[in-house]
Amino acid sequence: MSEVVTYNRDGSVGVITVNYPPVNALGHAVRSGLLAALNQGLADAEAKVLLLVCEGRTFIAGADIREFGKPIQEPVLPEVMNQFENSSKPVIAAIHGTALGGGLETALGCHYRVALGSAKVGLPEVKLGLLPGAGGTQRLPRLTGARKALEMITTGDFVAAPQALELGIVDAVEAGDDIREVGLAYARKAVEEGWPVRRVRDLTDKVEADKGSEVFDEFRAALEKKARGLFSPFKCVDAVEAAFTLPFDEGLQRERALFSECMASPQRAGLIHAFFAEREVSKVKGLAKDTPVRDVNSVGIIGAGTMGGGIAMNFANVGIPVTLVEVKQEALDKGLGIIRKNYENSAKKGRISQQQVEERMALITGSLTYDDFKDADMVIEAVFENMAIKKEIFAKLDAVCKPGAILASNTSTLDIDEIASATARPQDVVGMHFFSPANVMKLLENVRGSQTSDEVKATVMAVAKKIKKVGVLVGNCYGFVGNRMLHKRGAEAMALVNEGATPQQVDKVLTDLGYPMGQFAMSDLAGIDVGYRIRQERRNSGEDVPLSWLDKLAEQDRLGQKTMAGVYRYEEGSRKPIPDPAVDAIIEEFRKEQGITPRQITDQEILERCMFVMINEGAKILEEGIADRSLDIDIVWIYGYGFPAYRGGPMFWADQIGLDTILNAVEKYYDELGGDQWQPSALLKKLVADGRSFGDL
């Protein structure tokens, strides 16, 4: 008998217990142990009903990620589930915590399911570029019907136990917190009442009701927009449809064939890399696990604009009180009004209750004085990119804030050390770069200054997790990781348009790669004035930043979506970018002023110049130690800039293409175009010479 799965009997109930910390994942020992325990229970004449229950904090929470990329050992999960389903004795799954992926498939292979009210179930395989491969696409729709099964499987979203009961996924939801006792009580009832074996595969009512339904075509059409470029969501639909068009055993075969197609897809490799990378970024190189973390029970925020308001919402959402300071009452009232409107909109969509709206608003206090920061554990400055203003603010904070308070800047480009120089406590100063909209975007790019203490580094990473962000700790340089690479891409995109491409051609190449929007549509979303201010700041500091036609747009008050006109024009109530002949004329005039004769530019050149310049810069970022690992860069770009997760991030994508291919192109553009951005990275050259990849670092 496996050590991680045991069998014993409690009266007339045979109890199969899984104990494989931390999440009872379906590793080889668990799979083989489940079969052995099942056979022991079937051979136990005194056991009338079998109960499957898990120790620890959760039911089976999915596959064992330690086995990813390795050959699967027998028995495979579909075989285990078939034997459970074909048991001659009723088998009951008792669910607590989460039953996810193969965990839910295991429960669906049982004959009855009881759950604690706090439990959640789901089939999130699509998020790894896969589909449920142990009968989930065939059994779930027999319980829920086609539409709900498609929703759960194509999104990977979890369902709470009460809703799972309504949908028929579980048969009972019980109060209490001792899942073994709840399961035993339910199993004893099954014995007393003589419940029969009830196999999910034999349930046909929902299948018959949805046969011939248009729901499958509806989902495919919706996925063309929501899952553009993705492979596995469409295969999920094909698999679920098989439950309605094929006998059960043939449906299982179809599911396995589609599962194998997903396994062979490059997207699976990219998504699994992103999955592991997201977990790895929390482990900061050189930062001891036992580094003390400061308490952050109250937060101050300077600036009630779009960024400041969004940042405030992150803290209020998790119960941390916020003091929001503005210079003028009018600006403060406007900012608080927008926050309330955002919460009200969430309530209208059913995401939070009206009571939660009021609770969260009550946690946000407006103020016009820095004196109200005197007891704050952390203060985050969120004003526009101007070094003089930021230094003035930090000097004031230094005078007002208590010792040990963390002073953070939401700057997206500026030198954290220079900001810290305005204080007598540079060890407490750090960058916390949120992404717009700050209450939605998952990335938090934490920036360490040269004197930022380890305590502060550990604390801001812990805060990221607390407010449900993916925190990445990076070094201090112009633009840090994300914007440093973005600005190289942006400059190249501008050069391509100057030379003859159109903004929409450049954007289409990027969206075809999988970005949700292109360079110029993104500029319109962020606001043309944001980049304009950054360029002006650099010019004011003495940098040679050439003038551009984007500057002309800003000076004409074409600031993007917020003014209904930027690089593109916009219609009322729509965010769809529409090419504008007026912008074409501005670009044409700019070319004439610069003496540029436009030429035809291929999509391949656009792809190479926009993407390979980023890869080269990413390599320099690694050389300089601004990012510790290539996966840090990948996560910054996936969660901060919409790089398609199924491509694994820009550095992973570069490894897939081949670093020799990229280096050859970089050297070619350096010869043709010149410029520091095309100076080949020494690290890139060394990796190619050694036959290694970024992933090997």
Image (cartoon, grey):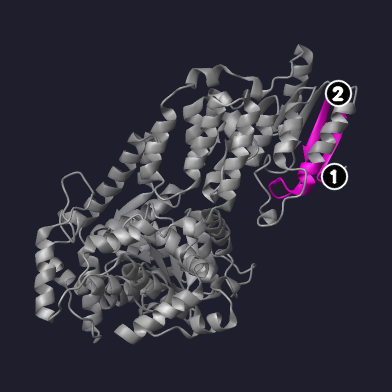
> Which quadrant is the N terminus positioned in?
top right
| Residue 9, image quadrant | top right
For the residue labelled by badge 2, is the local secondary structure a helix, a strand or a loop?
loop
Range of the magenta residues? Answer: 3-32
* Residue at 54 percent of width and 21 percent of height: 207
Residue 31 is one of the magenta-drawn residues: yes
Q: Is residue 66 left or right of residue 455?
A: right
Residue 681 visible in the shown view: yes
Query: Residue 196: x percent and y percent?
Result: 74, 16
Q: Nearer the viewer, residue 560 or 411?
A: 560
Q: Earlier in the sequence, mark 1 or mark 2?
A: 1
Query: Residue 692: x percent and y percent?
Result: 58, 76
* Residue pointed to by mark 2: 47
Residue 431 is one of the magenta-drawn residues: no
* Residue pointed to by mark 1: 2
Question: Marks 1 and 2, how far apart in space?
Answer: 20 Å
In the displayed structure, 488 sits above or below 161; it is: below
Query: Residue 572: x percent and y percent?
Result: 16, 45
| Residue 524, image quadrant | bottom left
In the displayed structure, 404 sits above or below 522; it is: below
Mark 2 surroundings within 10 Å by alpha-carbon count, few (fewer than 14), some (14 through 19), many (20 or more): many
Query: Residue 574: x percent and y percent?
Result: 21, 45
Q: Is residue 26 left or right of residue 515?
A: right
Q: Nearer the viewer, residue 534 or 649?
A: 649
> Which quadrant is the C terminus positioned in?
bottom right
Residue 352 visible in the shown view: no
Q: Nearer the viewer, residue 659 or 29?
A: 659
